Each structure stands twice: as structure tokens, then as C-alpha cells.
Image: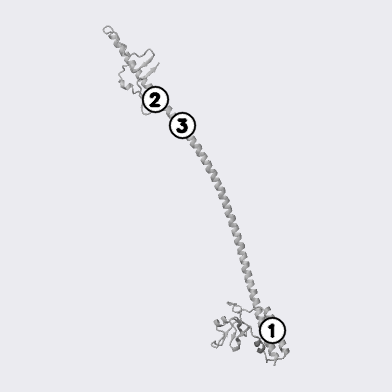
Amino acid sequence: MVYPRTRQTTNAAKVNASLAIAMEHALTCNNLKCRTELGDRALVTTCSHIFCLDCVHRLGLAGQETPRGTTCPACNSQLSKPDDAVITNLNPSEDYKTSVLSGLSPNVIMECAGRALSFWAYQTTQETYYQQYLYKTLTEKYSNLTVRLDQTVSDANAEIERLQHRLNSSAAEQEGMRRKNEELAQAYRDKSRKLLQTQELYDKVKRKAEMGHIQRAASDAVDSTLHVASQSQTATREFEGYNQDTQPEPRNTFALFSQTNRFDVAGMNSGIPRSSLHHVGVEDGWMRPAAALQCTF
């Protein structure tokens, strides 16, 4: 038989339990390699640790075949008794909540509730410590990463500055090389112009020298011809003086001077072959052959 007051108390307990569950955080597996959020069922130990069923089966913490003397994975406590590690329902039904402590004395109920609250406080404390350790670790990693980031940024800025300096130096060097190239090109043009002027002057001097050689050769030829003509005229006069009584007056064969006062070398019997008189001079860049060589006095 259920009394109405008991029913009202049960309804109030439901509301309070719902609010408590909403305000509480979910437990996690105490295996540091797992840290999985627990579901409806988990294994609870008398050393105030709780594990998920996957870790329970993997570590062999429950079952009839499990040998006694198993240790807790979290604190290495001995779990030799049957009730040292039991699988419990973390979300019990209302009927289970009604009957689980029914019939127990208030002292036992309070003791059970106190131990349960101690278990929850221990789990909360351990979770707080873990979160603090995680926060500290992450803070240290963040600080190290910040230092490394600052160092990387500083190195990058230094490298950028060094490369910028090298770029500026290269640009200045390129500008200097460009100006030097222009100066060398201008100097080359000046040298080329001076070389051309020198070549032209050399050609003029060469032509003048060649003309001098030609003039000296012509003068030597004229002198030789005049010398031969003079010798021939002297010999003729001697011969005429010797034979003037017996010989008729000779014809003026060696008319040295004509009415135009020009000396006719071609008409003079100088003993030089007439054909040679037509080739007075030097070929290969000298005066070309002439029909007659005349000299004006």
C-alpha cells in the first residue's frame, strides 16, 4: 500500500534528481589513455575510480574468469574482493531508485549516500586537477608556441630585411653596371671614331708617300734620260767636228728643243730602246705607262 505523502515525496525526488542531473557534468573514464565520456553503464571500484565497459573488457576487470588479485588501472590498488569492482547503471530507472535503498536503516542509507557523495567529490576533484594540468600543459605549449612564433617572425623579418638589403645592393650594382656599360659603349664609339680618323690619315699619308716615290722615280728617269741625251749630244758634236769637211751638214736628228720649248725624249736617239720609253715608272699602284715623257724647262 502506497501512502499519498510518499507519492508526493517521490515526485519531488524526481524533480530534484532531474535538476541535479542537468547541473552535474558527465563522468569520464579514469583510464588516461581513454578519457571517454561514460554512458549508461560503467565499472566502479572501491578505490573511487570508474571505467568504461570497453576498458573493462580490454583490461579484464570484470567477469567470472577474471583471476582475483586484479589491480586498478588508475591507482594500482588490489581488487581482490568480489564487490571491489562492480558494474553499475549510471542512469537507473525510477523503480530501481525506489527499491535500491528500501528496507535499509537510515544510518545505512546515510552511509551509502555519504560514500556515494565522497565518490562524486573525488571524481570532481580529480577532473578539476586533470583540467588544471591540461590547462597548464596547454598554456606552456601555447607559451612555447608563442615564443617560437615570435622567434620565427623575428627571423623572418630579419631574413626579409637581409634580402631587401641584398635586393637594394643588387639594384644599385645593376645601376652602376648599366652606367659603366654606357660609358664603355661611349668610349668604344669614341675609339672607333678616332680609329677611323687615324685610318683616313694613314691612307692620306700612304698615298702621299706613294706619290713621292712616283715623283722620285719619274725624276730619276728624267735625269737618266737627260744624262744619256747629254752624252749622246757631246759625242755627236765631236763626230761632226771631225767629219765637217767630208760630211754634209747632218740633219738635226736630236732636236732637243722644239718651238714649244718642250723636251722630246721619245725622239732622242739615246741608245735606250724606244719601247722602254713607253714604260717609264713603276706599275702596281704607280703611274701607268705613258706614250712619251716630256719635261718643261
Per the image, label 2 sits on a secondary structure element best described as helix
Q: What element does badge 3 sit on?
A: helix
Q: CA distance from mark 3 to mark 1?
A: 124 Å
Q: Which residue is mark 3?
A: 200
Q: Residue at x 54, y 47 (%)?
A: 174
Nearest-to-viewer mark from 2 and 1:
1
Q: Residue 141: which quarter of the image?
A: bottom right
Residue 264 vertical position relative to residue 99 in the rendered view, above or below: above
Q: Is residue 94 left or right of residue 211?
A: right
Of the 4 image quadrants, the one containing the C terminus is: top left
Q: Which residue is mark 1?
A: 14
Q: Is residue 134 left or right of residue 208?
A: right
Figure colour scheme: one colour
Q: Given the current orientation, which residue lies at the most extreme right position?
A: 5
How crowded pointer 3 is (Cα within 10 Å; few <14, some 14-19, many 20+) is rated as few
Is 47 in front, or is 24?
24
Please state which of the two labelled residues, at mark 3 or mark 1, is closer to the viewer.
Answer: 1
Q: Which numbered marker is on residue 214?
A: 2
C-beta proximity under 8 Å, tags 3 and 1? no
Q: Is residue 279 above or below residue 18?
A: above
Q: To which quarter of the image does residue 12 belong?
A: bottom right
Residue 223: x and y in percent read 37, 19
Which numbered disc flags the more N-terminal residue, 2 or 3?
Answer: 3
Q: Residues within 10 Å of mark 2 (few under 14, many from 20)?
A: some
Of the image marks 2 and 1, the number of the one nearer the N terminus: 1
Of circles 2 and 3, the one toward us is 3
Q: Residue, x 31% and y 20% (percent of image)?
A: 274
Q: Is residue 81 visible?
A: no
Secondary structure at numbered mark 1: helix
Task: Tell me which amino acid carries mark 3.
Answer: Glu
